[in-house]
Amino acid sequence: MCRVEKGSEKCECRKQVHWDIMGLKFLGESNKAEKLKSSGPVSRSRIKLWMIRAITTILLWTCVVQLMALGEMWGPRLLKGWPSCFSHSDLFLSAELSSVPAKVLLPPKRVYKNNGYLMVSCNGGLNQMRAAICDMVAIARYLNVTLIVPELDKTSFWNDPSEFKDIFDVDHFIASLRDEVRILKELPPRLKRRVELGMYYSLPPISWSDISYYHHQILPLLQKYKVVHLNKTDARLANNGLPLEIQKLRCRVNFNALRFTSQIEELGRRVVKFLREKGPFLVLHLRYEMDMLAFSGCTHGCNSEEAEELTRMRYAYPWWKEKVINSDMKRKEGLCPLTPEETALVLSAMGIDHNVQIYIAAGEIYGGQRRMAALTDSFPNVVRKETLLESSDLKLFQNHSSQMAALDYLVSLESDIFVPTYDGNMAKVVEGHRRFLGFKKTILLNRGLLVGLIDQYNSGSLSWDEFSSNVKEVHADLMGNPKRRVVIPDKPKEEDYFYANPHECLQLLDEPLRST
C-alpha cells in the first residue's frame, strides 16, 4: 500500500495500482515514454528466451521418445547379444506365464520408396508355409516393396480353409515388422481392381534362389506391373550365401512376428499345464499318417490291402510326382518314417523312462490302435490332445489341420524332449526353434543306421544290450547340440535346412558373446 500524504504522490500511487491491476508494464502517464523505451528490449529478449526454451523442450522430448522406441528395439540385443531385437520373453513359450498384459511399444515405421506390391500364395502344410512366410518377408524387405498378408494353401491334401488370421495374430505380424517392411492386409482399392481385371504378373519363383535372382528377375517385374503374385513359395530362398541381415530377418519373423492367435496359444497353455502337472514329458512327432505313407511310398509293416490303398492315394494326387517307389530300398536308405513298432524299440534302447508321458504330435496314425499297440505297451502314458482336452475345446479346430498342427507345434516347443520320427517340415522347423530357445534336447534319429540295427535285432543277430549300446552311440551327438549347418554347394536339398539350424541367429556355446 502507498501511504504518502502528498496529493500528487497519492495520485501517482493510485495510477500505479490501477495499471498494475490492468496487467500493463508501464506505471503512469507521467513517465510513459521513458518506461516504454526501457521496457521494449527487455520484453523482446524475454520472448526470445521463452521461445528458445520451448523449442529446446520440444526437441528434447522428441529425442526421448525416439530413444525409448530404439531402446525397446535394440536394448535386448545390446544387453544380451544376438538374437535380434526381440527376447525370448516375447514368445509364448515360457515356463511361467504372466497374466499381466505387456506394454506394447511399436518400432518406428521404416520409410522407403515403394517399388510395388508383392502378393504370395503359400503351398503345403503349416510349417512349410511358416518358413515360406519368413522368406517372403525377407524378399519384400530387400526389394523395398509392400507385402500383402500371405494367402494360405486351401487346395492341398489337407483341404484346410483357414486364413492367415485364423492361425496367426495378423495385427502383431504387421506391427512388429513395421520397421522393416510395409505389410497390408489387402491391396489398395485401385490396385485391387487391376488385379481383378488380370492386370498383374504371376509366376512361381525358382527354388533355392539367392537374393540376386529376386533383384534381377523379380524387381523389374514389380516396377513394370506394380503388382506381382508369387504362386509358389516352398523353398524359394537359398539356405546359404545370403547377407547376414536377411538371415537374421528370417529368424525375427519366425521367432517373433509369427505369433499364433490367442485362442490357439491359450489352448496350448492348457495342454502344457495338464502335462506339467504330472511331470516331465516327451513329444513324439510320429509321422505315420496316411498322407505321409502314400507320398513317400513307405509300406513297411502294412498289409497288402493297406499298401494298395496307399498306392491308389499316391496316384490320385498329380502334384506328387514320384509314383513308382521301392519301399524296401527307400527304407534302407533311411528315407521312410519309423513305424510305431520301430519307434518303441528305439526309445526303449535309448533308455527313455517307460513311465514318462509321451505326447503324440501328429494326426491320425495309419492303422489305428493295431499299429500303436507296441508303443503303448512299452510306454503306457501315451497321450494326445484329443485325450487331454474336451471335445468341446477342439470343436473349432476340427477339419482345420493347420490349426491342430499349430497346437502340436506349441506343445512340441515346451517339451523336455522332442523326437521326430521323420525329417519333414514340422520336425525341421521345431528343431530350429528349440535351438533358438536354448538348444533344448531334440533327438535327431539317424534312420539309415537305425533300420539296419533294428533288422539285426529282430533277426537275432544282435542282443538287446548290443542293440541298445549301438543306438545310444549313434545318437550321442544328435541331440540338437550347437553346430554349424552343413553346406553342400549346388545341392540345396541335401544340405542342412536353414530353419532347422539358423546358426546365424543363435549364440553358439563355444563362441564369445556378440553385441550385434
Image: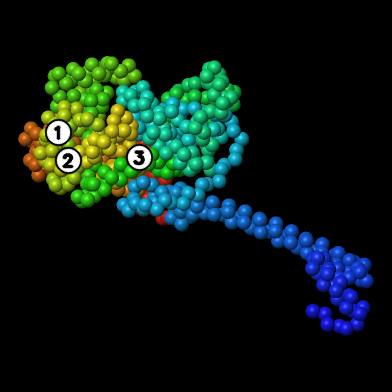
Residue type highlighted by circle 1: Met
Residues at marks 2 and 1 touching, judged by CB atoms closer than 8 Å? yes
Residue 119 position, x and y percent, is 49, 27
State how far apart marks 2 and 3 are (Cα).
25 Å
| Disc ID at residue 372 | 1
Query: Residue 124: where, in percent of width, then height?
Result: 36, 27
Which kind of residue does numbered mark 2 sit on?
Val
Q: What mark, if any, has residue 263 been given in the picture?
A: 3
Neighbourhood count class around disc 2 (C-alpha, 10 Å): few under 14, some 14–19, many 20 upward: many
The kind of secondary structure element at disc 2 is strand
Q: From the viewer's perspective, tell me whether residue 128 is left or right of residue 175.
A: left
- The residue positioned 58% from the left and 24% from the top of the image is 190
Q: Which residue corresponds to the image point at 35% horizontal and 40% vertical from the top-left?
A: 263
Distance of label 3 from label 1 (alpha carbons): 30 Å
Say which element carries label 1. Answer: helix
State the residue in front, 427 or 472: 427
